[in-house]
Image (cartoon, rainbow, N blue to C red):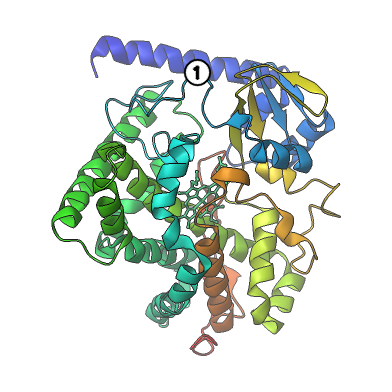
Amino acid sequence: MALRDQARLRLALLAFRSALRAHALFGDPAAAVLNRSPNTSPYGLYERVRQRGDLSRSSLRMYATASHSVVNSILRDQRFGVRSANNQGRPSFQPAGVATGDRVHPIQDSFLSLDPPVHTRLRKMVAPWFTPRALRAQTERIETVVEGFLDELADRDEFDLIDDFAVRVPIQVICDLLGVPSEEYQRFIPWGAILGASLDDVRTVTEHRRLERALGEMAEFFDALIAHRGEQPGDDLVSALVTAGAQDPEVLHGDLLASTEILLVAGFETTVNLIGNGVLALLRNPDARSWFIANPDRADDLVEEVLRHDPPVQLTMRMAHEPVTVAGVDLRRDDGVLLLLAGANRDPDVFGNPGEFDPTRSNNRDHLAFSAGVHYCIGAGLARIEAAVALRALFARYPDLSQAGPARRRHSRNINGVLHLPVRGSAVRRSVLT
Ligand code: HEM
């Protein structure tokens, strides 16, 4: 980037950060959420948003809500979209805000950030790989993967839960699905972390440079993979995408690139935190842990409660595509709403005693951790299986698992979890899964 552009970018980012800080200081709850230190708990801030009403206006020229019923209804309402009503074309590959060059951006340019009908067409191309039937066929492989990684830890009574276990499981599973060699997995970890952090908006020139580099590396890697699968298709998702894309002239190369990249990144950057947050919840709640060790077949309930209580994705945005009244508030076309998924998950109107971690609660599947409506997480079923298998196997082997040092939190306000979590335990036996 030219020096003059760098200076301009630095100024724009400084103005953005200062405005956010000032609004937060003057008590705007949405600004406080977007400006909070990633090391602090967000749940008190979500409570403040809720106290201001079901849908409250923020001085940031948007609205915010932590109400379960409002978040749920906006996510399912076709009068709202993920893009502005005035920006419904194909991705320009030039993201709004801070330009990232002509790189494809897996979050901003994939179907995650597109509205119907383009969203529908692109999502349909990958949907067959995530049906309940397709997932059932993968469960055994996931169990083998999990057992294999635990076997590798057998001689160690201290390890890092994230690096040595939690991140390896979803990376291996998504690599199998995409047909990507998993030996390269160490390269994927920084890509996921950089893209996850960029969900907060890029805030410094260094972050901008880091993002550009990661986007370039990802494009190079997946361009080569797509070209290879075009010549030699295999029995994997990328081959199926390339074949389907070749038959549909409306599918662009950028669409294939963005779809494969979002699947890789969303496939592990979120699930690692579901496993990590599940372990943290059990280490902090001895009653829940004893219950789980006595009832390993209730791993599904445990996972739902982790998703409700401390979800890996905290928030999302929607924009009104036409004038619409929500919770008695009149929104204009292109008004944005900050949807606090994690706040909705603690709405006392839906969940009694919402701050308490209780895997036996009867309605724990009513959370919004995977969103709702047309963008409902396509990998939800896969993530649920991975986390249930991983937590069951881990605590079967290490019923005495304990924290062996301070955890280091992720530097993100949206992606919620820990980067490092030293643990210790003595492996008692090979797990119940095999
Ligand atoms: C615990 C793990 C996960 C969580 C908490 C999670 C969360 C979410 C959320 C909240 C959304 C919707 C965002 C919005 O409405 O604006 C979403 C969409 C998506 N997720 Fe996940 N996700 C997880 C795992 C996965 C996995 C394993 C995959 C892929 C293998 C995946 C792929 C996607 C994709 C492609 C979308 C876009 C769907 C669309 O726009 O139609 N996710 N996820």
Asked if residue 210 lies left or right of residue 31, the reply is: left
Q: Looking at the image, can residue 333 be seen?
A: yes
- Give the residue displayed 73% in from the left and 44% down from the top: 344
Q: Position of residue 78 (x, y in %)?
A: 62, 34
74 over 192 or under it: above or below: above
Task: Give the amino acid at mark 1.
Answer: Asn
Looking at the figure, which quarter contains the N terminus? top left
Which quadrant of the structure image shows residue 138? Answer: bottom left
Report helix, strand or loop for mark 1: loop
From where the camera sits, is residue 405 visible? no
Residue 10 shown left or right of residue 385 in the figure: left
Q: Is residue 421 above or below residue 140?
A: above
Q: Is residue 388 above or below residue 226?
A: below
**Residue 26 rendering spot, x and y as whole percentages:** 72, 17
Q: Residue at image x 69%, y 69%?
A: 301
Q: Nearer the viewer, residue 243 or 186?
A: 243
Q: Quadrant of residue 294?
A: bottom right
Residue 13: x and y in percent read: 45, 18
Q: Residues within 10 Å of mark 1 (few under 14, many from 20)?
A: few
Q: Taking 422 as reference, is 3 above or below it?
A: above
Q: Which residue is mark 1?
A: 86
Task: Name the residue at 34% across, 12% down.
Answer: 7
